[in-house]
Image (spheres, coloured by chain):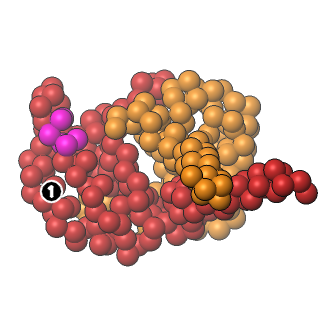
Chain colours: A red, B orange
Amino acid sequence: MQKQNRRTFIATATLAGSALVTNASSSMQKKNSIVHHVFFWLKNPSSKEDLEKLKAGLRTLKNIKTVKQLFIGMPASTEKRDVVDNSYHVSELMFFEDLEGQKAYQDDPLHKKFVEDCSHLWEKVVVYDVRNDD
Amino acid sequence: MQKQNRRTFIATATLAGSALVTNASSSMQKKNSIVHHVFFWLKNPSSKEDLEKLKAGLRTLKNIKTVKQLFIGMPASTEKRDVVDNSYHVSELMFFEDLEGQKAYQDDPLHKKFVEDCSHLWEKVVVYDVRNDD
């Protein structure tokens, strides 16, 4: 092995190992990780202010330690089909490493503050909790 | 800069840059990426064979090029609350980079084969398509 090649090999090997560790999605794919998907229907769907308030409240939740990933979104303009429910207004999608992480989130003061500050904004909420199996 | 330090610096800089590129979750968090979340209710919820057939079918979908992430799961044993719907049997959660990726998935022969092979297994399906906004 030439000196330059050896150096390159070491850099590549280090890179491969570290990329695995720093890739947040690795832990998300672990069996038994938890998906927490919440759909909100606003009381005043025409109020842009209410929408922004809810989204701002949701953003605070990523400061909770056990929340590994947080995605905030709205209905996508995919093809209209009978099976697609696009009647909700805001989607909150979270990943936890395990059931304990989800429980800690429910009990976290930041989560309680979010509910206190924002629950007057929605008229309906539906939650799906999923345990990843693969 | 000493030779060794310079070498280490280059390796670290390369690592930082490449980790960003190889981290699949980075692209998932991009504004306008698409979440496609499907919930299945089986015709025969007591049939372990039907459940395994559906899960095996879902696993084939990760071979579709535009599917950036696929999570297959079942209801998590989180706290029972009125807002939590845990009546479904199987959850399929996918990420696409954009709307075009989701459309290409719908039209992909592998997806069509999955529907052909497995649609007799479910009695109800609900789909949520979300455009990530943050």
What secondary structure prevails in the magenta region?
helix
| Chain under callout 1 | A
* Residue A9 place in picture, x, y as percent: 78, 55
* Residue B79 place in picture, x, y as percent: 31, 72
Question: At 89% from the left edge and 54% from the top edge, which residue is drawn?
Answer: A2
* Residue B101 place in picture, x, y as percent: 58, 29
Question: At 56% from the left edge and 24% from the top edge, which residue is drawn?
Answer: B100
**Amino acid identity at mark 1:** Val
Q: Is residue A52 above or below residue B70?
A: above
Q: Residue furthest right?
A: A1
Q: Which is nearer the eye, A125 or A48?
A: A48
Question: At 15% from the left edge and 56% from the top edge, which residue is drawn?
Answer: A115
Taking the image as shown, residue A62 lies to the left or right of residue B69, namely left
Residue B129 visible in the snapshot: no
Taking the image as shown, residue A46 lies to the left or right of residue B78, namely left
Q: Is residue B48 above or below residue A82?
A: below
Q: Residue furthest front?
A: B2
Q: Which residue is mark 1?
A: A115
Residue B84 image-quadrant placement: bottom left
Q: Which is nearer the eye, B124 or B38?
A: B38
Question: At 47% from the left edge and 26% from the top edge, which residue is drawn?
Answer: A78
Quadrant of the frame with the N terminus of chain A: bottom right
Residue A12 visible in the snapshot: yes
Q: Is residue B70 above or below residue B84?
A: above
Residue A84 image-quadrant placement: top left
* Residue B7 place in picture, x, y as percent: 65, 53
Does the magenta run of residues contain A78? no
Identify the magenta region: A51-56
Taking the image as shown, residue B112 lies to the left or right of residue B76, namely right
Q: Which is nearer the eye, A108 or B70?
A: A108
Mark 1, secondary structure of its residue? helix
